[in-house]
Amino acid sequence: MLNAFAISIIRVLREKGHKAYLVGGCVRDILLGREPADYDVATDATPDEVMRIFPDAYGVGAQFGVVLVPAGGVVGDVSTESRTVEVATFRSDISYTDGRHPDEVRFSKDPREDVQRRDFTINGMMLDPVGNEVLDFVGGQADLKDRVIRCIGEPDLRFGEDKLRMLRAVRFAARFGFEIDSPTFAAIRKLAPHIHRVSRERVRDELTKMLTEGRARPAFLLLDGTGLLHEVLPEIEAMKGVEQPPQFHPEGDVFAHTLLLLEKLPHPCSTALAWGALLHDVGKPPTFRVAPDRIRFDGHVDVGVKMAAEICRRLRFSNDDTEQILALVDNHMRFGHAMRMSESTFKRFVRMPHFDEHLELHRLDRLASRGDLSTYDFTRNKMSALTPEAIRPAPLVTGDDLIAAGHIPGPRFSEILSTVEDGQLEGRLLSREEALQFVAREFPVPKQEN
C-alpha cells in the first residue's frame, strides 16, 4: 500500500535524524475519512540528502526541493506497488514573476515556514503518522469542520503566486461541498481575468477534474459566480438565458439543461464523455431563433461541432480526445431517428467507436429534459438482440474482387462496396456468390473505348 510506503519513508528519514511528516491533500483526506489518491512527505532533509538516503529517488524539481521516491521494491519490511511518493524539503518561496514558479527558494528547517507558502488552509496541515499528531499552523482543522475553503494568508498574494489556484479553490469547494470564504471569493472575482496567464493545458486539466470528480454542476455554478467561466469558457456562459421550447425542455434555458446533464454524469467517467456532455448544445446560443411555431436552433449541431473544435484546439486536447468529443457533439441528435433507421443505417450507427459513450450521453440528455428514455431503451434492446458479427460482418465482396471483375479502382469502388454492405446488413445478400451476382447486375463493368 502506498500509505505504508510513505510512512516507511518518514521512518527512515527520522532514523537519519531528520524531521518528516505527511503533508497537504493526503492529510486533508485522512481527516475527512477519505482514501487519499497520493501521499506527499515534507522534510527538513535537502534534496541531495533525500537522494542519498533513497538511491532510487530522482529529482523532478530539485531546485524547488521536490524529489520522487519510487515505490516498487521494499523499504524496511514494507512491500510496495509501482508508484511514487513526493518528498519535498521545507522551504519558503520568494516572489513568483511567472505566476507559477518561485523566483527563489530558500530551504528551511521549520515546518511552520513551509506551510505558509501553500494554497489553502485545508491543504496546509501536516501529520505525524507515527505519533498520530496533526501539525496545524494555519487553522486547517477548524476550516475542515466549518466546511470552508480559505487561502493561507492574503488571498491576493496566494493567487498572485499561481493563478491556477483560483480554479483549484472552485474545484475543492465543489468536490467537498464547502463554501469559499468571503475574502478568498472576492479575490477570485477581482483576479479572474488573470487566469489567462496560466497555460491552457493546466486550465484544461483543472476543468476536466471538475467535470469528472462527480460534482460538475456545483463546480460550474461556482465558475459562473466567480467570473472564471466568462474567462475560460465564454461559450458556456453564453448559454445563460437562451430559452428552449418548453414542450421539449421544461427544465429551462440551455444553461440550466447543461447543468442538469452535468449533475447526472457518472462517476468516474471519461474525459471525452464529460466534455461531450458539456459541449453537446454549445451551438444553440448562436443559432437561436423564434419561428412561428416554436423556438428553433437550426443547424446547431454543425455549428456546435465547429465551436467544440475551436475549444478543443484552444485547450490543447489530444487528437484522440478531440475526435471523440466532436463525434459526441456531432451525433447526439441522431438518436431521435433511431426507431426509423433502416437496418443498415442502425448497424452503422451503433458500431461507431466508443458507442457506449454516445448512448450514455443520449440517456443523460433525455434525463436532463423530459426524462423520456424510449429511444434509449429501443437502441439498447435492439443492440442486445444483435451479435457482433451482425453489426460488423466480414465483407462479402472486396476491392480485389471488383478488380478481378474488371472494375477500375476509383471513387466508384466505395459506392459499390457500400451498397453491397447495405444489402448484407439488411439481410438481402447472404453469400459471396449472391453479392458478386448483385454487383454484376447492378454495377456492370463499363465498356472500354477503343
Image (cartoon, rainbow, N blue to C red):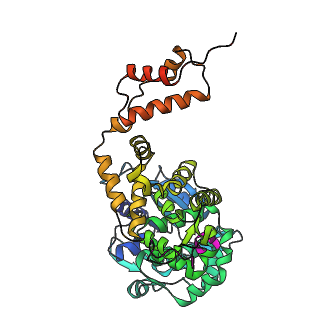
Residue 64 in the image, given as x and y percentages of width and height: 60, 64
| Picture residue at 60% right of the left edge, 22% below the top | 409
Q: Nearer the viewer, residue 42 or 261?
A: 261
Rendered image quadrant of residue 3:
bottom left
- As drawn, the residue found furthest toward the right would be 97
Residue 133 in the image, given as x and y percentages of width and height: 35, 78
Please state, as top left, top right, bottom left or bottom right, where the C terminus lies in the image.
top right
Query: Left or right: where does residue 144 sit relative to residue 272?
Result: left
Q: Nearer the viewer, residue 13 or 355?
A: 355
| Picture residue at 55% right of the left edge, 78% below the top | 113
Q: Which residues are magenta?
A: 231-250
Residue 127 in the image, given as x and y percentages of width and height: 39, 74
Please state, as top left, top right, bottom left or bottom right, where the N terminus lies in the image.
bottom left
Query: Left or right: where does residue 197 sit relative to residue 176?
Result: right
Residue 63 magenta: no
Q: Nearer the viewer, residue 362 or 152?
A: 362
Q: Main secondary structure of the magenta part?
A: loop
How many numbered tags mark residues here? 0
Query: Left or right: where does residue 109 sit relative to residue 230?
Result: left
Q: Nearer the viewer, residue 176 or 259?
A: 259
- As drawn, the residue found furthest toward the bottom would be 182
Residue 153 in the image, given as x and y percentages of width and height: 57, 85
Rendered image quadrant of residue 65:
bottom right
Q: Is residue 416 above or below residue 299?
A: above
Q: Is residue 2 visible?
A: yes
Q: Is residue 278 above or below residue 446?
A: below
- As drawn, the residue found furthest toward the top would be 450
Q: Is residue 103 visible?
A: no
Rendered image quadrant of residue 191:
bottom right
